[in-house]
Each structure stands twice: as structure tokens, then as C-alpha cells.
Image (cartoon, rainbow, N blue to C red):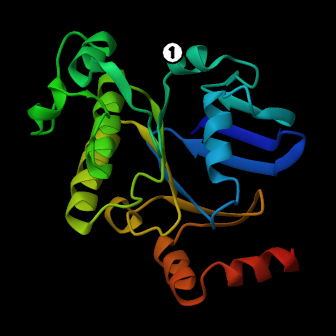
């Protein structure tokens, strides 16, 4: 089976500082992968680079999506190909309701996940943390993408909301969408059971493991200190 997303030896800098230091990730169609790591490891920079944020400069390496080299593609072109990002901290936009945005994205049908009240409110204005996550998920569903990056969607959620969000993500995956879950703590992996877990430390993937429970257990017992020791051994 070919890969949907291929990231090869990706080196990225921001304000002349190297952030990503030779990242390799390969995601198959209909696959769920996770990316764990401590704060400042470069996880969100990777997400933004895949989406094509121009403030992050690719100095070496390539990104392929559906067999196309998209390393120099604009964010708009990447989105049209089927890439979507669920933001960790989405912006608030006054004067535009969530419903109006969703209609612009996909006028055929409006989903609301049982929270129809959110539709008439200005986008993320006064939204709680959980409501912002729902707003992001609704936008993802309306975009109908092939590959979605979830950047810390589990951050700040209580267990009830975490389960709710995970169920919606599972439905997305059941439609054949590939997922990359970026997370710090990793609790959401117990609901989504990824095919592969990648651990990033200091801008490098230092571990890729199929047994996500093993990774979570290690991090829970030792934090990322043990990962740091593994990195030094390599």
C-alpha cells in the first residue's frame, strides 16, 4: 500500500533557528498515527509546516501528499488536495457566525453535533475551551478532507468532553480519513488506538512504536526523561 503522506528528512527553521532536524513520517491511507513529545519539541511546527505556513522555512527535505511533492505548495492548494488542520488555539472572529462559515465551506448540509446553539454565535467569540474544539471539529467535517492533523485537541478537556470529541474523530476515521494526532499527555490515544505512535524530542523523531500503551506507560512513569536518554544513545 502506498503512503498518503510522506515526510522525508524535513528540516525547518523559524527566525533562523532550526526547529525540525530531519523528520521522517509516513502515513498510509485510512491510518491513525500519533505524535507525542514534550512542550517545545517541534510538534506544532511540524503541523504548521505540513499545512504550508510560510513563516516556517523548509531548508531541507520534502513533503509528498498523494504522490505529489507539495513542499512549495501554498496552504490553499494543500487544503484543496485534502489536508486539514484542527488548531490548538483557533482565533476568534467577530461579525461571522459559525453557521455562516460552515455554509460557506459546505452549503449542502450543516452538522451541529447536538449544539445547534453554537451555530448562531460569532466564531469562537466567548466560546469555552470545549466549544472551540467542537467548532474546529465541525469545520473539519464540513471540509470533507482526506487527511487531518489534530493539534492538541485533547488539551484542557475534561473526561466527558474528551470522550465526546474522540467519538466524533472516530466517525471521521470510519469515513476513510487518515488522522495525525498531536498530543502531549496522550490520554486520547486510549479512545482512538493509533496504528503507530511517534515520539518527538528536540525536533527529531526518536521513537516509532506500534504499541501505544507501551509508550503511554513509559511516559506516565518516567515522563519524557527516558525518551531523552534514548535520544542520546542514538
Q: Nearer the viewer, residue 47 or 158?
A: 158
Quadrant housing residue 191: bottom left
Task: Report the side of 141 relative to 212 (left or right).
Answer: left
Would you identify the image quadrant in which residue 207 lies?
A: bottom right
Quadrant of the image for the C terminus?
A: bottom right
Q: Does residue 71 appear to the left or right of 101 in the view shown? A: right
Q: Is residue 97 above or below residue 41?
A: above
Quarter assignment of residue 144? top left
User: Does residue 111 appear in the picture of this structure?
Assistant: no
Q: Please tell me whether residue 186 is drawn above or below residue 56 in the rendered image.
A: below
From this viewpoint, is residue 151 visible?
Answer: yes
Residue 65 placement (x, y as % from top left)? 62, 28
**Image x and y of residue 171, in percent:** 25, 43
**Front position in the image: 110 or 126:** 126
Position of residue 19 measured from the top left corner of the image (x, y, whole percent): 80, 50
Q: Residue at x 60, y 88 (%)?
A: 222
The residue lying toward the viewer, choosing from 125 and 169, is 125
Please tell me which residue is depicted at 44% across the width and 29% down the height of the picture: 146
Residue count near mark 1 (Cα–Cα under 10 Å), binned few <14, some 14–19, many ≥20: few
Quadrant of the frame with the N terminus? top right
Image coordinates of residue 63 in percent, x first then y, are 72, 32
Which residue position holds label 1? 80
Amino acid at each position: 500500500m502506498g503512503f498518503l503522506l510522506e515526510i522525508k528528512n524535513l528540516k525547518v527553521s523559524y527566525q533562523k533557528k532550526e526547529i525540525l532536524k530531519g523528520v521522517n513520517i509516513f502515513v498510509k491511507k485510512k491510518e491513525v498515527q500519533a505524535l507525542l513529545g514534550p512542550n517545545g519539541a517541534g510538534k506544532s511546527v511540524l503541523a504548521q509546516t505540513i499545512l504550508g505556513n510560510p513563516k516556517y522555512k523548509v531548508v531541507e527535505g520534502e513533503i509528498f501528499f498523494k504522490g505529489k511533492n507539495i513542499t512549495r505548495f501554498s496552504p490553499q492548494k494543500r487544503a484543496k488536495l485534502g489536508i486539514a488542520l484542527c488548531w490548538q488555539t483557533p482565533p476568534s472572529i467577530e461579525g461571522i457566525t459559525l453557521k455562516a462559515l460552515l455554509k460557506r465551506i459546505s452549503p449542502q448540509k450543516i452538522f451541529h453535533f447536538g449544539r445547534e446553539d453554537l451555530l448562531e454565535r460569532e466564531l469562537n467569540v466567548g466560546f469555552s475551551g470545549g466549544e472551540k474544539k467542537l467548532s474546529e471539529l465541525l469545520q473539519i467535517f464540513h471540509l470533507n478532507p482526506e487527511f487531518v492533523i489534530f493539534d492538541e485537541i485533547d488539551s484542557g478537556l475534561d473526561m466527558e468532553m474528551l470522550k465526546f470529541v474522540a467519538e466524533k474523530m472516530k466517525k471521521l476515521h470510519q469515513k476513510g480519513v487518515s488522522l495525525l494526532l498531536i498530543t502531549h499527555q496522550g490520554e486520547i490515544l486510549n479512545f482512538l488506538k493509533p496504528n503507530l505512535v511517534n515520539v518527538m524530542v528536540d525536533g527529531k523523531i526518536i521513537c516509532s512504536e506500534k504499541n501505544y500503551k507501551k509508550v503511554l506507560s513509559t511516559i506516565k512513569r518516567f515522563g519524557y526523561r527516558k525518551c531523552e536518554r534514548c535520544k542520546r544513545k542514538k
